[in-house]
Amino acid sequence: MNEGPAGGRSVRFPLSLRNVEDLLHERGIDVSREAVRFWWHRFGPMFASEIRQKRAERLRFWSQKRWHLDEIFVKINGERHYLWRAVDHEGEVLESFVIKTRDKKAALKFLMKTMRKHCRPEAIVTDRLGPYGAALWDIGAGVRHETCRRANNRAENSHLPFRRRERAMLRFRKMRSLKKFVAVHASVFNHFNQERSVSSRSHFKSNRVAALAEWRGLCTE
């Protein structure tokens, strides 16, 4: 059995490790949830790295058009942390960043980290959280800042797959685990995100087949 797909299911789908164990058992594969956890820790970062490398050229071109930034809180052992996320105009997750604060310093650190990887975009859309505007003016990008009503739905919707997965995992217990999962989950989400609402059925099906074939190729390398 190829361990990669089994570990990948625990990232791609909102399933607990026990769910993956039961699904494999129905197919005649007897493994424990700890084995699935081991596969995820071993193969998840490898797959994520391969996906990022294959999509790097595309991101360099498209990610410079428009960014959508948003943040949500995530509890780790009862303590509140913040997950900051940047997505492009097509819903591609560009960068994820976990920190304990939601102030100007955190926003500035997040923006600088994202811009080092993807250069400066033509426009940056956020909600009306004050630290965004203050940080953008500090780095000379204040004129590119947009806060129109409902304009940031793209970033807010990008949190939904993570929230579903978070519930299945019964939350996180360590910041290191959260950071690792967020990085891997974003890459896998980007790979299978086909934007069904903006493409025809035939185009969506062909893209889905191509994404699945590439995924299987990653798992067998």
Image: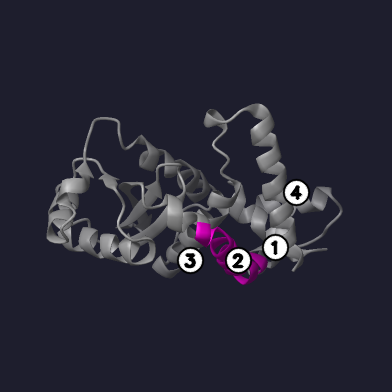
Q: Secondary structure at mark 3?
A: helix
Q: Which residues are magenta?
A: 39-57
Report if the CB atoms under discs 1 and 3 are less than 8 Å apart.
no
Q: Main secondary structure of the magenta part?
A: helix
The image shows residue 170, relative to residue 158, as above or below, that is below
Examine the rendering and report whether any part of residue 14 can be seen.
yes
Reading the image, the residue beneath label 2 is 50
User: Which of the two labelled residues, at mark 3 and mark 4, occupies the earlier sequence position?
Assistant: 4
User: Which of the two labelled residues, at mark 1 and mark 2, occupies the earlier sequence position?
Assistant: 2
Reading the image, the residue beneath label 3 is 180
The Cα atoms of the two marked residues, 1 and 3, are separated by 19 Å
The image shows residue 16, relative to residue 2, as above or below, that is above
Residue at 38% x, 65% y: name it: 117
The Cα atoms of the two marked residues, 1 and 2, are separated by 7 Å
Point out the frontmost of discs 3 and 2. 2
Q: Secondary structure at mark 2?
A: helix
The image shows residue 37, relative to residue 211, as above or below, that is below
Examine the rendering and report whether any part of residue 15 can be seen.
no
Looking at the rendering, in which quadrant would you find the C terminus?
Answer: bottom right
Horizontal side, residue 202 vs residue 193: left or right? right
Instruction: From the viewer's side, name the closer residue of 157 and 7.
Output: 157
User: Which of the two labelled residues, at mark 1 and mark 4, occupies the earlier sequence position?
Assistant: 4
Say the numbered circle drawn on residue 23.
4
Point out the frontmost of discs 1 and 3. 1
Residue 18, given in percent of the width and then of the height, sits at 66, 53
Q: Residue furthest right?
A: 28
Report if the CB atoms under discs 3 and 2 are less than 8 Å apart.
no
Residue at 65% x, 57% y: name it: 8
